[in-house]
Image (spheres, helix red, strand yellow):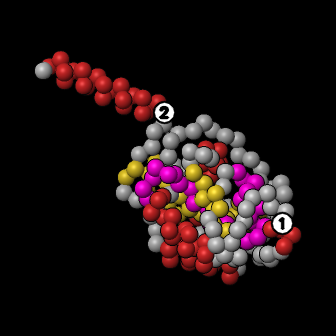
Amino acid sequence: MHKNMVKMLGILMLVLFVLSMTGAAACSGSTCTTPSYKPVAKADISKNTPKTTINYKKTQANSTNSKISLKENTVVEVAQLKQINTALKNGPVLLKIGAEWCGSCQKMKPILNKLATEYGGKATIMAADVGQSPKLVEYFGVSSIPDFSVIVGTEHGKYVYMQQNGKVTRSRSQARIVGLNDKRVFEKVLDLTIKK
C-alpha cells in the first residue's frame, strides 16, 4: 500500500511539473489565466493607420481594400495587428481575447454575436484566440481571459482605448474589461465611443 501511494505521489509531482513547464492555463470564477509566451517586441502600429481616428466615416473604398472579411453583423476572427488596423479605418473595434477551452469565454460568444448585430456598420466586433494568436496576447499584455477592450484609433503609433467612464487613454490597462460581463457594459462603452 505504501509503495502505491509513493508511486502515485511521484506521478502527481511529474504531472504538476509538466504543467508548470508548458505554461498551462487555469480557470477560476469568471476568468482564466493565459499560458506564458515568450516576449515579443511591440510593433509600431502607425504604419497604414491614421494618427488619430475618432470620427468615423465608412466608405466603400475602405471596405474593398481590406484583406480581411469585415462583414457586418458577424464577429471577425483576428490573428494580426494589421487586421485590427484595417477594421479601425471603418470605426471602433471591440476586441475580445479568449480561448476555446475557457468556459467564461464561451459564455460571452452569444453576447458578442448580439453586439455584432446591434453595432453592425458602426463598430467591428473582433475575437482573438490565445492559442492561435500568442503574439497578440503578448502585445496586449493579456494575463486573464476573457479580456476585452474598445480601440477607438491610434495616436503617435499607439492604440487609443475608450474607458468605461467615457475618457480615452493610450493605457490599455486602464480601459480593459476582464471576465464575464453583461452586454450592457459593452453597449455603454461602444455608445460612448460612437458619440465621440
Taking the image as shown, residue 93 lies to the left or right of residue 129, namely right
Residue kind at label 1, given as amino acid type: Thr
Q: Which mark is residue 174?
A: none
Using the image, determine if residue 97 lies above or below residue 116.
above
Specify the segment rendered in magenta.
Answer: 80-104
The quadrant of the picture occupied by the C terminus is bottom right
Q: Residue at x 56, y 48 (%)?
A: 130
Taking the magenta stretch, the answer to whether it contains residue 128 is: no
Residue 167 visible somewhere in the drawing: no
Characterize the local packing of mark 2: few (<14), some (14-19) or many (20 or more) Cα atoms within 10 angstroms: few
Closer-to-camera residue (159/108):
108
Residue kind at label 2, given as amino acid type: Thr
Residue at the farthest bottom position: 195
Q: Position of residue 76 (x, y in %)?
A: 65, 62
Q: Position of residue 64 (x, y in %)?
A: 83, 66
CA separation in Å, label 2 and label 1: 41 Å
Q: Position of residue 18 (x, y in %)?
A: 42, 29
Tag 1 residue: 64
Using the image, determine if residue 34 lies above or below residue 5.
below
